[in-house]
Image: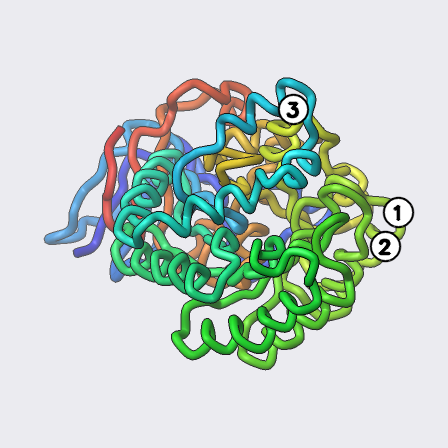
Amino acid sequence: MSLLVKNIGTLVGVDESGRERVEGRAMAEVATLENAWLLADGGRIVDYGTMDSCPEVEGCELLDARGGWLFPSFCDSHTHIVYAGSREQEFLDKINGLSYEEIAKRGGGILNSADRLHDTSEDELYRQAMERIDEIVAMGTGLVEIKSGYGLTLEDELKILRVIRRIRETAPLDVRATFLGAHAVGRAYKGRQEEYVDHVCLDMIPAVAKEGLAEYVDVFCDRGFFTTEQTERIIRVGAEYGLRAKIHANELAISGGVEVGVANGALSVDHLESMGDEQVEALRGSRTMPTMLPGCAFFLGIGYPPARKMIDAGLAVALASDFNPGTAPSGNMRFVVSLASIKMKMTPAEALNAATLNSAAAMGESKDYGSITRGKVANFYITKPLPSLAYLPYAHQTPVIREVVLRGKHVKTL
């Protein structure tokens, strides 16, 4: 059934340019259309215009926006939503002065989540993950990438990816999967990191590919985790099996992960809390999307990525939530947009572009997602009437979203 949305106060993110990303100064512009309507059919945006040209469509579902603003859904290109339980004890450890690396060395962090996941059934993992999915849908996300990485054994990595596949088959939003076996070294391989890398390359990646469980391969390339040489080996093996690269880079130190990502055509390099001029220059002219996760910097109390430096250098940048139990226990992309403005001095327009079209590009999906464009997937949310675009990140805790539409279907009223 088609869906006609009428009486839209402002239609935000209108873009018929055909571009797949927004770069540099252009990020400061978001096209809008006031007093508008939008028609969706077959899960896609068919048309839109001003209310004086609103069509009469027989047999379609009608949705009255009542003067609210219509935004393209957020595209969250970096999450770890499938995990078992929570890690608030480590939250207390951080309050008491321990660093992320110190917690990891004590057996916490990623290994803690791996232990819990090992003892949790697929059904229970799915149940917990779907609660988080419902949460992010209500907060405006319409396309999400979910990583494995809390398994660290062949069996448990496959378990996570099968749960992600189940979410993809049943959730109202669109889901993409990433194999992140190289999130940390599994306990069984402690002190034998090269052997673990062999295991990832020779056993895990072929098994993941055989079942068709992932689109992407990722590596935590950072101080205390995986080296640039190990990262390059893993993503090259992934490429042989049709997995596109996405790299955790430069969270804890300037690791070389940015350069490895660019050299190997990675879709994105993510985190980037530690960045110098050389890394910015390496990204210039590449198709690798620098993706910032300010929710992680906020939660850990570490420095934020240099967004202004990258945008002023002419780069496109993306935003994602990093939703995970240890360093960013929230998938609220609206809060991510607010942090980008408050802490990284991105304008609201820049932050919105980074969280929609550019984050879709960080998944290679911006031809179908991330803007209000004829022919794109009809993923959007409708807010209460707003005084301006800046109000969305400004009033970051005010509940303004009223309606959610995904794949052209009205899925939630708030």
Q: Name the residue under label 1.
A: 277
Do we see residue 295 in this rendering?
Answer: yes
**Whether label 1 touches label 2, CB < 8 Å:** yes
Q: Give the position of the C terminus as an image quadrant.
A: top left
User: On screen, 244 above or below 189?
Assistant: below
Q: Name the residue under label 2.
A: 281
Do we see residue 283 in this rendering?
Answer: no
Q: How far apart are marks 1 and 3 (CA)?
A: 23 Å
Residue 362's quadrant in the figure?
A: bottom right
- Looking at the image, the residue that sits furthest to the right is 278
User: On screen, 291 above or below 231?
Assistant: above
Would you call the spot at circle 1 few (<14 residues within 10 Å), some (14-19), or many (20 or more)?
A: few
- Residue 171, given in percent of the width and then of the height, sits at 28, 51
Q: Give the position of the N terminus as an image quadrant.
A: bottom left
- Secondary structure of the residue carrying tag 1 is helix
- Residue 180, given in percent of the width and then of the height, sits at 55, 59
- Secondary structure of the residue carrying tag 2 is helix
User: On screen, 164 above or below 32?
Assistant: below
- Secondary structure of the residue carrying tag 3 is helix
Q: Name the residue under label 3.
A: 342
What residue is at 53 percent from the left and 65 percent from the top?
Answer: 216
Q: What residue type is labelled 2?
A: Glu
Q: How far apart are marks 2 and 3 (CA)?
A: 25 Å
